[in-house]
Image (cartoon, rainbow, N blue to C red):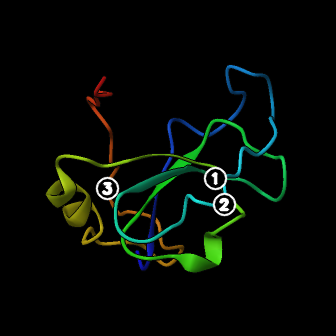
Amino acid sequence: IIGICSLCLGRGGASIYGKQFEDELHPELKFTGAGILAMANAGPDTNGSQFFLTLGPAQWLDGKHSIFGRVCQGIGVLNRIGLVETNSQDRPADDIKIVRATVPM
């Protein structure tokens, strides 16, 4: 996986807001490095239930995907995910699951 590590929960589908929802873009939020958490989409205002984490800077995504978090601990785990063997469709050879995540308050 080069540049972006896509992690999906299930096969996609509806979010808590329904099938799709609008982008929430903030110009000050940028894809500056590893660990940026953002919504995956198929174009403007097509956010659903899929998200991704970056493995490095990805400036070409600025203004196109809603950023809503970042990895603040455990970046080594993300780096290891980025090293996982992939198939010809650039999908991990083995399932990668997020078993636990916390949101600091």
Circle 2: is it few (<14), some (14-19), or many (20+) Cα within 10 Å? few
Which label lies toward us, 2 or 1? 2
Where is residue 19 shown, x and y percent of the image?
A: 80, 29
To which residue does mark 1 refer?
40
Residue 66 relative to residue 88: left or right: right
> In the image shown, does 76 or 93 lie closer to the viewer?
76
> In the image shown, does 36 or 19 lie closer to the viewer?
36
Which label lies toward us, 2 or 3? 2
- Residue drawn at x 26%, y 29% is 100
Distance of mark 3 from mark 1, alpha carbons? 21 Å
Of callouts 3 and 1, which one flags the residue occurring earlier in the amino acid sequence?
A: 1
Q: Amino acid at mark 2?
A: Pro
> In the image shown, does 78 or 65 lie closer to the viewer?
65
To which residue does mark 2 refer?
27
Of callouts 2 and 1, which one flags the residue occurring earlier in the amino acid sequence?
A: 2
Q: How many marks?
A: 3
Where is residue 11 shown, x and y percent of the image?
A: 60, 40
Residue 65 relative to residue 90: left or right: right
Q: Secondary structure at mark 3?
A: loop
- Residue drawn at x 55%, y 58% is 29
Distance of mark 2 from mark 1, alpha carbons? 17 Å
Where is residue 68 shown, x and y percent of the image?
A: 53, 43
Distance of mark 2 from mark 3, alpha carbons? 36 Å
Residue 82 vertical placement versus 77 (above, below): below
Residue 46 vertical placement versus 5 (above, below): above
To which residue does mark 3 refer?
94
- Residue drawn at x 73%, y 43% is 47
Disc 3 + disc 1, Cβ < 8 Å? no
